[in-house]
């Protein structure tokens, strides 16, 4: 008896059972892959933003600044002027967060004399496209740094970078091999963009489904195929330079504590590591924000004096 013929046209009960199980497994994998692909699209799709912000109503007299990003055209940021020829601190928002949520931290830094830049990654803000969870965002940050370095009213040789999760990945990636970055603060870091995707997928509660995680990650990698040669942050962590580095690990984001610590170990000195009971600056209460701001501002004052 030809087993393939029997499976195509089963005549025995066990052949019918095997054929049904094979069909069920096929449709289960197909459905799981479809659900995974949909959730990946939902994760990387442009984040909704609120109404346009009137800069004249913001403290610190910020200026609207435009710059070019390869492949994305013109982007915009808010430049908060500090002391003339002072260094610039660039604040990189986290996943699904926007520059407007970082205004208190920006004005706090500006009050101490720093120039500060707030901007949105391409997955958010006006003319939003989609997020790559880090692949493209490193280049977006470098373009913003180049625009700042073209100004005549700043110290072009000294930058400070701050970022959390997605923003932290971009900040660390941009700092690798760039001696202008003299102070770096990163919170809830990860090694590769698919690592953040895995963290975000667990929030939907579907990871116990067979093959779900693998199929979802694979669809994300297919979507970002042109970035397939991008090395993980760990491969370049040794090139973070001799500027001071602060690695913040938030216990309320436990899945990213380990990756942040691993990158801290690989980074060259000087460096320091702090375990926070509360991360996610945008979601903090007022008192928690003030404590967090004091820690970050004190770090920059000590290691990147204006």
Image (cartoon, grey):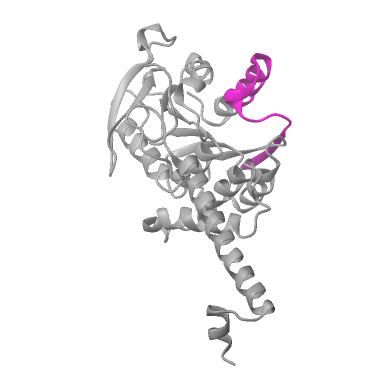
Q: Residues in magenta?
A: 271-298
In this view of the protein, can residue 192 be seen by the observer? no
> In screen coordinates, is 79 left or right of 110?
left
Percent coordinates x, y for residue 161 in the rendering: 49, 34
Q: Position of residue 93 (x, y in %)?
A: 49, 31
Asked if the stretch drawn in magenta spans residue 138, the answer is: no
- The residue located at (53%, 49%) in the rendering is 35
Most distant residue in the bottom direction: 1
Q: Nearer the viewer, residue 69 or 39?
A: 39
Q: Position of residue 241 (x, y in %)?
A: 51, 47
Q: Residue sitting at 60 percent across and 21 percent down?
A: 293
Determine the image quadrant of residue 82: top left
Front residue of 197/237: it is: 197
Q: Residue furthest front?
A: 11
**Residue found at x 60% / y 73%:** 19
Q: In the figure, 3 relative to 245: above or below? A: below
Q: Pick whichever, 210 or 176, lies toward us.
A: 210
């Amino acid at each position: 008896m030809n087993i393939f013929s029997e499976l195509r046209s089963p005549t025995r009960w066990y052949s019918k059972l095997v054929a049904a199980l094979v069909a069920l497994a096929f449709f289960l994998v197909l459905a799981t892959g479809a659900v995974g692909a949909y959730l990946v699209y939902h994760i990387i799709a442009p984040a909704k933003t609120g109404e346009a912000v009137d800069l004249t109503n913001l403290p610190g007299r910020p200026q609207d600044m435009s710059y070019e990003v390869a492949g994305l055209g013109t982007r915009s940021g808010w430049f908060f002027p500090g002391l003339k020829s002072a260094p610039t601190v660039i604040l990189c928002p986290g996943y699904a967060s926007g520059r407007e949520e970082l205004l208190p931290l920006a004005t706090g830094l500006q009050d101490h004399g720093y120039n500060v830049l707030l901007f949105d990654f391409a997955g958010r803000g006006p003319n939003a496209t989609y997020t790559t969870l880090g692949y493209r965002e490193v280049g977006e940050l470098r373009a913003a740094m180049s625009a700042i370095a073209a100004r005549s009213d700043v110290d072009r040789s000294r930058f400070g970078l701050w970022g959390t999760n997605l923003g932290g990945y971009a900040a660390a990636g941009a700092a690798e091999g760039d001696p202008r970055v003299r102070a770096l603060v990163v919170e809830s870091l990860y090694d590769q963009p698919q690592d953040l995707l895995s963290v975000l997928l667990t929030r939907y509660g579907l990871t116990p489904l067979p093959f779900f995680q693998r199929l979802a990650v694979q669809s994300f990698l297919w979507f970002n195929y042109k970035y397939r040669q991008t090395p993980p942050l760990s491969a370049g962590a040794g090139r973070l330079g001799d500027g001071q580095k602060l690695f913040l690990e938030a216990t309320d984001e436990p899945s990213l504590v380990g990756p942040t610590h691993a990158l801290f170990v690989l980074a060259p000195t000087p460096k320091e590591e702090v375990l926070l009971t509360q991360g996610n600056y945008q979601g903090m209460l007022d008192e928690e924000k003030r404590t967090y701001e004091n820690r970050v501002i004190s770090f920059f004052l000590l290691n990147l004096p204006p």
